[in-house]
Image: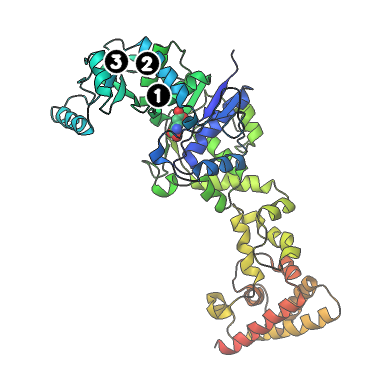
Amino acid sequence: MALVRTRFAPSPSGFLHLGNARTALFAFLYARKTNGRFILRIEDTDQERLVPGSEASIYEDLKWLNLNWDEGPDIGGPLGPYRCSERYDVYKVQLKRLQKATRVYRCFCTTEQLDQDRALLSSQKKLIKYVGRCLNISDAESEKRAATENFVWRMHIPPGDPVVVNDVIRGKVEMSRDVIGDFVLGRASGVPVFLFANAIDDAVQEMTHVIRGEDHLSNTFRQVLIYQALGHEPPVFVHLPMIGSEGGGKLSKREGSLSIGDLRKEGFIPAGILNYLALLGWSPGDTAQTGEKFSLKELSERFDLERVHKGRALFDYQKLRFLNQQHLNDLSLEELAKLAPPRKPGLEGIWKDAIALVRQDAATLEELYRIDAFLAAPDLKSSPSATTILKGENPKKALQEGLSLFEKAVAGNQPAEVALKESIQAAGKTVGIKGKDLFFPFRVALTGVEAGPELVPLAKILGSSEIISRLKNAIEFTASNT
Ligand code: GLU
């Protein structure tokens, strides 16, 4: 079998979002699985839709995801250039070849004319397609008018057998030539339309598999006609089902616009995102033994096109979080601390111990910063827990007793965490309370809330003078909280 060549061909018209990152991943995985080549091509012929900076951000996001390409605009390769705006000469040559091979004609119809045609066809409930007004203009006249009038190049599609696409996922799909009609290939300036440039590039860059979203299927029929006219064997087509929303229907604006950059900011890591995206429309087979957690390397070994689903893949944010958490669990504290460094000054020395207290509940890197709330002294006045828990005589007495024992213990060089544990217990005995009645006042005094990381390891991080200061504050608070 020929060397597999797949490509990801984004238009730099925005950021890499979930949908096209999944397309990139599937094309990448298939190339890696087959020891083929994965190519990046930037489709920037539609100058009006270009968004400055998006090409650079696509590179950055793909690299961050570890979806490295073997040929591309930045690294070159044997069949470049890989940026479409640098390939106009290629399209011109191929347009000439196409003109020799089949009927390609100039169409001088104005936008207004075409709009009127469309409106008329629609009112007559007829198929909307080009009416063929310019099809029979003689070559000589066409040549003459081209000197003064604007035009586009159209490819003529005479009646014939339906056009067949053998799609790996959907099987054999057909479209009647009559429905397709004479379509546009390029403008007078030589700038090709997307579907022409895209087909030419896939042909001359020797792509064996075109893996892309299902929304391109209607282009594919036209592209097959271009391949046939040029005598090129069409690539294998793999149209991935769209990603739908959990609630049914299309992805909501929020979900659909979820870019890789957004996910990165929310604290998702590449391994989690890639694992999730792989399962969004592909099934790894029997996961009874393995579970669903896979690294990029494992995915590259397991991936196949046969197990890509036909149906719409449903976006499931909770599953994304779940898988991300599983991949976070693989990281050491050193790695976590590097990926999520402290944001406030002075925490470097304790940061690893600090995030250790919250890591088991964190599904994202961002959630590690929950610890910040506990490292800072609580504002008891605005804490509902403080208002309810730090009320009455017993909590006050326990805190006073606890504080005085704690101060003595640390003055005798006992480590803060040992001193706190023992002082709380002893204070409980003196005041005659235990369980929640005893622990909640201390917990709320030190953190402002009833739930949170374990107190003893937190005490170790906070150190004795911080604990003393928080206990004093809480005792003061009890005086005003009557
Ligand atoms: N540039 C096209 C897009 O961003 C990709 C088309 C393709 O993969 O064939 O949708």
Task: Say whether residue 337 is visible.
Answer: yes
Across and down, in percent, residue 68 comes to 62, 34
- Mark closer to the observer (2, 1): 1
Q: Amino acid at mark 3?
A: Ile
Q: Secondary structure at mark 3?
A: loop
Q: Is residue 84 left or right of residue 101?
A: right
Q: CA distance from mark 1 to mark 3?
A: 15 Å
Q: What secondary structure is marked by label 2?
A: helix
Return the x and y of residue 103 as percentages of the image width and height.
31, 13
- Residue 3 in percent (x, y) is at 60, 17
On the rendered structure, is 30 left or right of 240?
Answer: right
Q: Amino acid at mark 1?
A: Phe
Image quadrant, ligand 1: top left
Give the amino acid type for the residue marked by disc 2 in the picture.
Leu
Q: Is residue 157 left or right of residue 420?
A: left
Q: Earlier in the sequence, mark 2 or mark 3?
A: 3
Residue at screen point 44% across, 18% down: 93
Which residue corresponds to mark 1?
Answer: 196
Mark 3 Cα-neighbour bin, 10 Å: few <14, some 14–19, many ≥20: some
- Residue labelled with disc 3: 157
Q: Which image quarter is the N terminus in?
A: top right
Height in image: 285 above or below 378? above
Residue tagged by mark 2? 225
